[in-house]
Amino acid sequence: MIATPVLVINSGSSSLKCSLFDMVTGHEALSGLAERLNTADAELSWRTGGKKHKLPLHGEGHASALAAINQVLDKLPDLNGAPVAIGHRVVHGGEAFAESVVITDDVIRGIEHCASLAPLHNPANLLGIQVMQRLYPSVPQVAVFDTAFHQTLAEEAYLYALPIHLYRDHSVRRYGFHGTSHQYVAREAVDRLKLDPDDHAIVTAHLGNGCSAAAVRNGQSVDTTMGMTPLEGLVMGTRSGDVDPGLHEFLAEQQGWSIQEITQMLNRNSGLLGLSNLSNDMRTLTEAAGDGNSDAQRAIDVFCFRLARQIGALATTLGRLDALVFTGGIGENAAGIRADVLNRLSLFGFDCDPDRNAAPNTADGRITRDSGTPACVIPTREEWMIAHDAHRLTRN
Ligand code: ADP
């Protein structure tokens, strides 16, 4: 029987993830994924007790997916009644939310207000919240924001050099994302590498389909690579990361593209996919590059060059570098990418140990030799962090 069950919902624009945790043991009793929502192929798949299940959703959307998850939970033998709390991932908290909060009507209005900054994400997050409030009216719900951890950035780090009224009147500034992941792996790194909790300077690199890096000083984010939207910064699976803002005018004039078409190209057809003309998936690219595919190698080279350059910039913000943490699907699994990036950063004292890098030790995750600056691999646990906050804020 699950003693203290907490449910986590990550309601995205076309997919929805859920996880049910036992907060006493940390065990994930159920994980589910609804994909291709609102299309003919919409489907819910979930895993519980080592078994996989699937259910077609017949073109339905978020509400049906959540109702189906509700029925799966009702039949779960280890769950006696409803979860004690529900945690929701919310992408954009603007300046209104510097930490996780119990959801009230005011919080819902605050998330709605931030929707102009994340028009694809926040409405989908809100939909998840509202459906779960209807399905579980007596269960407290908590919002955990991707941006919250970076609210400690100083003005000089978050302002763009634009007319200041754009910040004052329209909230145009850098916010940063993946905050839950950066915070988790930075804390773990302090613990595992035995750094001083009150005096440390760490760069964390979250490299998944979306990629961002952060500078963390004494547990607080002081700089990060993503900006007002998740498009800024590193090269990602399909996102370009930094480009010259003059590109928009050039493409509008030369190609006749609209702002929407350019934005779509920068978000969906760029990054690893655009450069390689092959795939947005790093595993596919490393395999292809290994077979001599120069297009795949080019994409990897640009990815590593930009990542190393940005890590160097973040280290400058920190003034020193005590450790570098790799996380996310690429950071946790792509040993060749880690070795390449560390090699480019030898100036900071990294000395990659090929054996450790090939199979990072699960205790401290260290992949560098004992002398020099440590770099380590720490698997991220965003869902667990959301469950943890939901439980922390709602237990009496
Ligand atoms: P998301 O941001 O969607 O959560 P993930 O964190 O799962 O994504 O990261 C997905 C990325 O991780 C993909 O580019 C995938 O190819 C890459 N990846 C996963 N396993 C490996 C591997 N063994 N080698 C190289 N890349 C990998």
Image: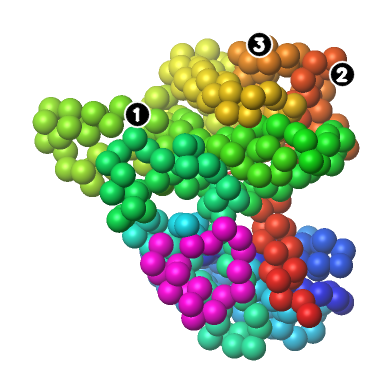
Q: Secondary structure at mark 2?
A: loop
Left or right of 145: which side holds 227? Answer: left
Left or right of 129: which side holds 256? Answer: left
Quadrant in which residue 148 is drawn: bottom right
The CA span between labels 2 and 1 is 38 Å
Q: Which mark is residue 347?
A: 3
Q: Residue 130 at what x, y percent from top left?
A: 49, 78
Q: Residue 113 at what x, y percent from top left?
A: 38, 67
Among numbered discs 3 and 2, the one appearing first in the sequence: 3
Q: Secondary structure at mark 1?
A: loop
The magenta segment is 96-114
Classed neighbour count for the residue bearing mark 3: other residues with Cα under 10 Å, few (<14), some (14–19), many (≥20) = few
Callout 1–callout 3 Cβ contact below 8 Å: no
Mark 1 sits near ligand 1, with its Cβ under 8 Å away? no
Q: Is residue 107 above or below residue 151?
A: below
Please name the residue that numbered disc 1 is placed on.
243
Going 54% across and 37% down the picture, which residue do you hit? 224
Check if residue 108 falls in the magenta segment: yes
Q: Secondary structure at mark 3?
A: helix
Please name the residue that numbered disc 2 is placed on.
370
Check if residue 239 falls in the magenta segment: no
